[in-house]
Image (cartoon, rainbow, N blue to C red):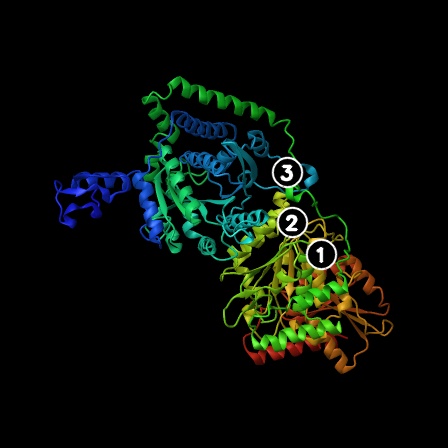
Amino acid sequence: MWIIKELDLSSYGLSGGDAVDSALLYGHSGRQSASELRDTLRQIYCGLISYEFSYLETEAEREWFARRIESGTDTIDRERRIEILKELLNSQAWDKFLSIKYPTVKRYCGEGAESLLTFFSTLFRLTTSEKLKHVVIAMAHRGKLNVLSGLLQCPPVKIFHKFNGNPEFPAEANSACDIATHLSASTDISMNGNTVRFSLLNNPSHLEVANPVSMGKTRSKQLKLMEGDYSSDESSRFGDKVLNVQIHGDAAFTGQGVNQETLMLSQVPHFEVGGSLHVVVNNQVGFTLPANRGRSSLYVTDLAKSIAVPVIHVNGDHPELVSKATNIAFEYQRKFRKDVFIDYNCYRRWGHNELDDPTFTNPLLYKLIHYRESIPDLYAEKLISESVLTEKDVTDINTEYTKFLQQQFELAVTYSPQITYYQEQWSGMCAAPDAVEVWDTGVDKEMLKVIGRASVTTPSDFNIHSHLAKTHVKNRLSKISEEKDIDWATAEAMAIGSLLMEGRHVRLSGEDVGRGTFSHRHVMLIDQEKETIHVPLNHIHEDQKGFLEVANSILSEEAVLGYEYGMAYDSPDNLCIWEAQFGDFYTGAQIVVDTYIASGESKWVRSNGLVMLLPHGFDGAASEHSSCRMERFLQLTDSSETAPDSEAVCMHVVNPTTPAQYFHLLRRQMVRNYRKPLIVVAPKILLRLADAASPLSDLEPGTHFKPVIGDVIADPLRVNRVILVCGKHYYELNKERLKAKIDDVAILRVEALSPFPLQALQQEVAKYKNARKFIWSQEEHRNMGAWTFVKPRFENLLGKKLLYAGRAEAPTTAVGASKLHRLEVEHVLREPLYNIK
């Protein structure tokens, strides 16, 4: 028997025969020998299931946990034991069937982790008994197909059809499709007289990034059901009707930084979901890396201690203990609404995938694995030995399920994929059209004034910051009264407020978004004496149905952006906006952009209307505060270089130069009957630039976003050079043009980059019959910005050569010395206006 220091009686001055009070343990009474108490403690805490909870921050949590595990019984009746065995045997039969029919396909089987299905089936019972409405699940590859086909009612024929090389969507979806282990499922599980919708998300192969997405989707459903802080009922709590579940891989959980970010969101206002239930599928090896090289902590779940939540360690060879672990974890989450972890200790029968030989790198481990019996066989032997069922019963279960799989396999030849998109809450949406559209997004002038005034109105007893009262409030009211010089923040407030008045919710998320990185927004105000928060736009009218959620986030990009994508993934009815502190900072979330935002609709037919605001502009702030790397977004779009674009491009990328343009973009996201991610190359200097203000009339009915803004200064007959530009660079060029009285140049503002505004450009270019040179002028370096995107499209589709004017190629986005910056500024102004003739 192993030695456990804490159970060494001599450490407490005791001998085995000493009598002690057994009431030290919950559920026990009377006196017994110290050795008997020690053995009881060893059985409870040091066996095939064990617990970590002594570090929990409240006595209530620690005492609850001790009481639950010391006095709980968790007995399982005969019927349930047979049900568990059937799940395990079916999972094993599934993997064996696939190994025969598809020996060369990577399927990331569940062999060695079959009792993970016991976790799910136990969760089915618990959530239906608790009368939950939704369970949102994030899960990576390992064993996912076993869960899909075995419990989540995904027809095996669908997976066989996919393994045969066929698309999982009808041809009309025009989908690029994805691998089988990235499939999603939504299933209604009915038990105990109740029905719970279980939703398993699509996931990319970037392990763990689905976790914050699942939390965002969970929060969206909580918003829909008006629970927790969304409810007027003070007794309502997040998690009352919606539960988040995350299934992790052991190596990925410890190795991927997104997990730390996601855990740090778990108890933060505007991001909490009432506690997530985590299972770490701990198969002792990551690809080829053994556990002792895969982390610097003792346990794979030690990251859980950073947020002071409990861990239950369980041996996966024992399904009934897996069920017990699930019971305890669920009960803790329900009571305390905090995260809880199950360290599910198991193994991986084969390599990272079935085509990989793990003995190259882990020979001793796999010598043990190859000679051990499987979890289903061990449990079958146990139940047979206890006369719960017979060997024939086990054989019949295997035979029956294998026969079912064979029938499904034969149906795959004639199987036709079903339509699974644009249903339920998305039923009012459709795919974007293969056309270019213009949407009237203007709003009644008087309504805009009401919203504008309300956006800076505070309660009579509210102590607003004196500087804001003198500047922000006074200036906005003056501009609204004069109906001119509407700045960026005011236009944004009017756009958001108009959507709220139409009954739509808006969520603004990111670092410091309440005030704004550049202290321009102030959409939430802080009482200077009480530090209470007031969001004026939530008090426009006493009967308003839509509300603004200002989610000042932790200092995270990847997890927070994934979270917001999940919010928008779930519902097309709410406008979700994520703003980077500076545009370049989004690069910490590149995985989310690549695998979800840019490609999610193409792979999974999952539309998403998320807005990304990325402050951008060269103003001497050096490398990490100048560029939002628009070239990366443009490269990720499926915009064509040789044919006209339509609204159907995968991402809409814009660089608006006026507050009115921004106003129309935000409203257009909600007005259209389809959803596309909107990437906004957002301003910094333009936020307060007088020349960049808009009259109120530009926001009224009959107005809309303009993909190209023409030149209203130049005489078309005198123009021999046309400069195309996007973003704030226009104002600098125009100022220099006017200063030097250059009258042979027209400047066109390309406000939309993707879809490429071919028709609008054709109309503007056609005005300049005498133009001989067309120049693309940009602030960015030649290997950055929009140059390499615009040039082939302009030349191929408009048939005119395009010259370059801007910074030369560089490995960094901006210089870090003011003298160098001033030289570059002079160059990017002189080159298109003076040097190219």
Q: Is residue 792 left or right of residue 242?
A: right
The answer to whether residue 789 of the structure is visible from this angle is: no
Across and down, in percent, residue 353 comes to 46, 39
Q: Amino acid at mark 1?
A: Arg
Dot 1 or dot 3, earlier in sequence: 3
| Residue kind at label 2, given as amino acid type | Pro
Q: Residue furthest front?
A: 460
| Crowd around label 3: few <14 · some 14–19 · many ≥20 (10 Å) | some
Measured along the vertical axis of the image, is residue 148 above or below residue 443? above
Q: In the current view of this chain or complex, which residue is farthest to the top?
A: 392
Which part of the image, by quadrant, shows the C terminus? bottom right
Count of marks overlaid on the render: 3
Q: Position of residue 520 (x, y in %)?
A: 61, 71
Q: Nearer the viewer, residue 581 or 399?
A: 581
SS state under label 3: loop
Q: Mark 1 or mark 3, which is nearer to you?
A: 1
Can you say which quadrant of the picture contains the N terminus?
top left
- Mark 3 lies on residue: 420
Earlier in the chain: of badge 3 and badge 2, it is: 3
Q: Can you tell which mark lies on residue 273?
A: none
Q: Which SS class for mark 2?
A: loop
Residue 168 locus on image (x, y percent): 62, 36
The amino acid type of the residue labelled 3 equals: Thr
- According to the image, label 1 marks what residue? 668
Circle 3/circle 2 CB separation < 8 Å: no
- Is residue 718 depicted above or below 647 in this figure? below
> Which residue is labeled 2 in the image?
572
Q: Secondary structure at mark 1?
A: helix
Return the residue nearer the eye: 501 or 601.
501
